Amino acid sequence: MTDDLTPKASSPTDLTDSVLASFDAARDERYRELMQALVRHAHAFVRETRLTEDEWDTAIEFLTAAGHITDETRQEFVLLSDVLGISMLTVAVNETDLDKVTESTVLGPFFVKNSPKIELGGDMAQGASGEPCWVTGTVTDADGKPIAGTRIELWEADDDGMYDVQYDDQALAGRAHLFTDAEGRYRLWGLTPTPYPIPGDGPVGRLLQAADRSPMRAPHLHFMVTAPGFRRLTTQIFIADHPLLDSDSVFGVKESLVRDFIRHAPGTPAPDGRVPAGTWTSTTFDIVLQRG
Ligand code: BEZ
Ligand code: FE
């Protein structure tokens, strides 16, 4: 052992051991496990990269800027977790029964709790602009049994790539919730999803620029699906064959969540009898919930 990193008396390794031991008495076992793992990995990072004091100052400035830009409607730390793939990895390590139930993906920062309720067949656009999209599907358990009364929250950006909460007027649009019928079915009008950039005017935007990374998200429609006795599902569906599927800025695309959005010519009647003025699309998303 001749390299510079060889442990010596009072070496960084002794330091790591001391910091690890400082958590030994933590009463909460899980807290102790998490903090000691964090210290081990963070110290290994400093040793591996030979982090300079200037670089650590830059990192602290970055985190400070993330704190300053964060408020009730803007969460830069979640965005950081998203672009580093930590959100998706956390989703992945907590998923089980993947072959039987619908997969999860990132929540993102644009969910709000007080969405308007719509009836089956209603319109979640609520004034948001875009091409109409007829969305239908079922909610069942892993044995195919329908789950009646399931609450489905949906939200999406308009065709300018903006969520309602990003506009000054704060009017709710492009979001709604509804409940499945006795056969576990749902249907509604939404908008054909469009690509949009994640917020780029803060430190996370600068992080992406420094890596020459695109901020664009693959076009998607968000779902949060809740039924008593089942695990809550947070997911999205994505438009098949879209060029951004392979370069989603938050690594949120999963193959099982990609859907065909079929485009219909102007004048074609929709299944509910509506005849949209221009083109419209239709898609289907059958959801399978996990008990628990
Ligand atoms: C979203 O899909 O709304 C989103 C997800 C992660 C980061 C930013 C936006
Ligand atoms: Fe989104």
Image (cartoon, grey):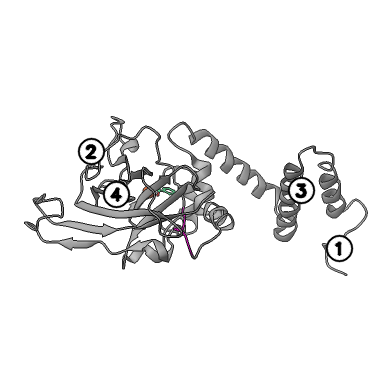
Q: Nearer the viewer, mark 4 or mark 1?
A: 4
Mark 4 vs mark 1, CA separation in Å: 63 Å
Q: Indicate whether residue 257 is drawn in magenta.
A: no
Residue type for callout 4: Tyr
Q: Which numbered marker is on residue 6?
A: 1
Counting residues from the start of the chain, the first of labels 3 and 4 encountered is: 3
Horizontally, residue 191 falls left or right of residue 22, namely left
* Magenta residues (range): 100-105
Which one is in front, 271 or 93?
Answer: 271
Q: Which numbered marker is on residue 126?
A: 2
Q: Is residue 90 above or below residue 61?
A: below
Mark 1 vs mark 2, CA separation in Å: 64 Å
Q: Which residue is mark 4?
A: 186
Q: Which residue is mark 3?
A: 36
Measured as percent of width and height from the top left, residue 113 is found at: 40, 34
Measured as percent of width and height from the top left, residue 128 is found at: 23, 41
**Residue at position x 25%, y 61% in the image:** 261
